[in-house]
Image (cartoon, grey):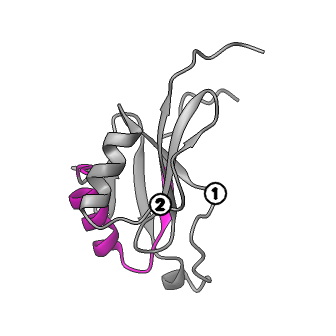
Amino acid sequence: MQVEQVDFVSIPTRDTARAVAFYRDVLGLPESGFSQGEVETTNLTLSFWEPEQDGLEFRPNEAGVALRVPDVAVARRELEEKGIEFMGDTHDSSVCHMGFFKDPDGNVLILHRRYAPRIPR
């Protein structure tokens, strides 16, 4: 098997319209021109899914989805001005900066910017 790329990631929600509005209006991601209940990034579609409509328990994604931004500090200030609360201080991993926050459903999102070159193992 050959995987060409990742096309979409499912994001659990209890309210698809609210999720789309948050990702569109707060994060600035455009709604999909192809499917309802989705927003687009340049390389990946975020598809919102309501597990309770399928008889499954709702559980937010606590592992996180990393959103690459040009500058974590600037993006964080912009979101804080919109009322977003972050989970602690911005983290410097020695290769990247990260800022953690949650969407309205409790899914963890990560502002991310790598500043060190990727070095093969």
Q: Position of residue 97 (x, y in %)?
A: 52, 36
* Pointer 2 residue: 101
Q: Amino acid at mark 2?
A: Phe
Q: Quadrant of the N terminus?
A: top right
| SS assignment at label 1 | loop
| Residue placed most toward the observer, 86 or 35 | 86
Query: Who comes first in sequence, dot 2 or dot 1?
Result: 1
Q: Amino acid at mark 1?
A: Ala
Please give the label number shown on residue 63.
Answer: 1
Answer with the quarter of the image where residue 93 lies. top right
Q: Position of residue 7 (x, y in %)?
A: 47, 41
Q: Residue at x 48, y 84 (%)?
A: 53
- Is 81 covered by the magenta stretch? no
Tell me if 109 is positioned left or right of 27 in this view: right
Q: Which segment is the magenta one? A: 9-30
Residue 23 in view here: yes
Q: Position of residue 6 (x, y in %)?
A: 53, 38
- Residue 19 against residue 23 in the figure, above or below: below
- Residue 27 against residue 48 in the figure, above or below: above
State the separation of the CA atoms marked 2 and 1: 12 Å
Which circle, 2 or 1, is nearer the viewer? Answer: 2
Q: Quadrant of the C terminus?
A: top right
The total number of labels drawn is 2
Residue 27 in view here: no
Dot 2: within a 10 Å radius of its alpha carbon, few (fewer than 14), some, or many (20 or more) residues?
some
Tell me if 37 is positioned left or right of 113 in this view: left
- Residue 112 against residue 89 in the figure, above or below: above
| Residue placed most toward the observer, 9 or 55 | 9
Tell me if 63 is positioned left or right of 44 in this view: right
Q: Position of residue 65 (x, y in %)?
A: 52, 50
Q: Residue furthest front?
A: 89
